[in-house]
Amino acid sequence: MKILVLNGPNINLLGLREPDIYGKADFQALLSLLRETGASLGIQVEQFQSNHEGALVDAIQQAYGVYDGIVINPAAYTHTSVAILDALKAVQIPAVEVHISRVSAREPFRQLSYAGMYCEKTIQGQGIDGYRQAMEYLVQKYG
Ligand code: DQA
């Protein structure tokens, strides 16, 4: 099984960025967690992070026929990007949405998730462990 992990803007600044909200684990720790989780689940995992909406759309389009599952944290684009939603709907790859923070307890503008309208599950408020949980879910269901 091949899983693509997509991260949107500012996720590369984990650790530095509002640690009271997003935790102290940095982006390298997230990459290590993805590698270790992939190895323990016996699957292939690739990660792509971008601060640009179109690059994330391109990555979703290019995933067609290549990946069996997508784990996506669109970050701020969660709340604005119809383009990311449409790309997910176009390729029809099973997807899980992850948010490091508990978005449901935050500002009103964070309560709408476009990507979440496609994703079959949302994991939030679990820190970077949410990515591991999302990968486990996809492997249990589709692996
Ligand atoms: C986030 C939540 C978003 O509202 C925010 O814009 C982010 C990160 C999270 O992982 O908790 O950048 O997706």
Image: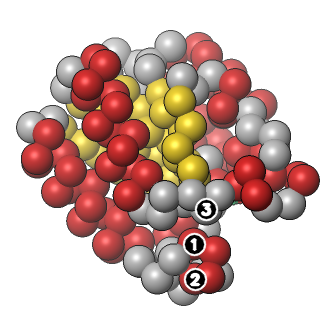
Q: Are marks 2 and 1 in contact (CB under 8 Å)?
A: yes
Question: What crowding class fits label 2: few (fewer than 14 Cα within 10 Å), some (14-19), or many (20 or more)?
Answer: few
Q: Are marks 1 and 3 in contact (CB under 8 Å)?
A: yes
The secondary structure type at the circle numbered 1 is: helix
Q: Residue at x 42, y 62 (%)?
A: 128
Quarter containing ligand 1? bottom right
Residue 67's quadrant in the figure?
top left
Q: Position of residue 45 (x, y in %)?
A: 24, 43
Mark 2 vs 3, N-terminal side: 2
Q: Is mark 1 within 8 Å of ligand 1?
A: yes
Relative to 91, say whether 115 is above or below: below
Relative to 89, say whether 26 is above or below: below
Q: Is mark 3 within 8 Å of ligand 1?
A: yes
Q: Position of residue 19 (x, y in %)?
A: 58, 83
Q: Which numbered circle lies on residue 75?
A: none
Q: Which residue is mark 3?
A: 101
Q: Which residue is mark 2?
A: 19
Question: What crowding class fits label 3: few (fewer than 14 Cα within 10 Å), some (14-19), or many (20 or more)?
Answer: some
Relative to 28, say whether 75 is above or below: above
Q: Position of residue 109 (x, y in %)?
A: 88, 52
Per the model, the C-alpha gap separating discs 1 and 3 is 6 Å
Q: Residue at x 74, y 33 (%)?
A: 114
Q: Residue furthest right?
A: 108
Question: What crowding class fits label 1: few (fewer than 14 Cα within 10 Å), some (14-19), or many (20 or more)?
Answer: many
Judging from the image, the colouring scheme is secondary structure
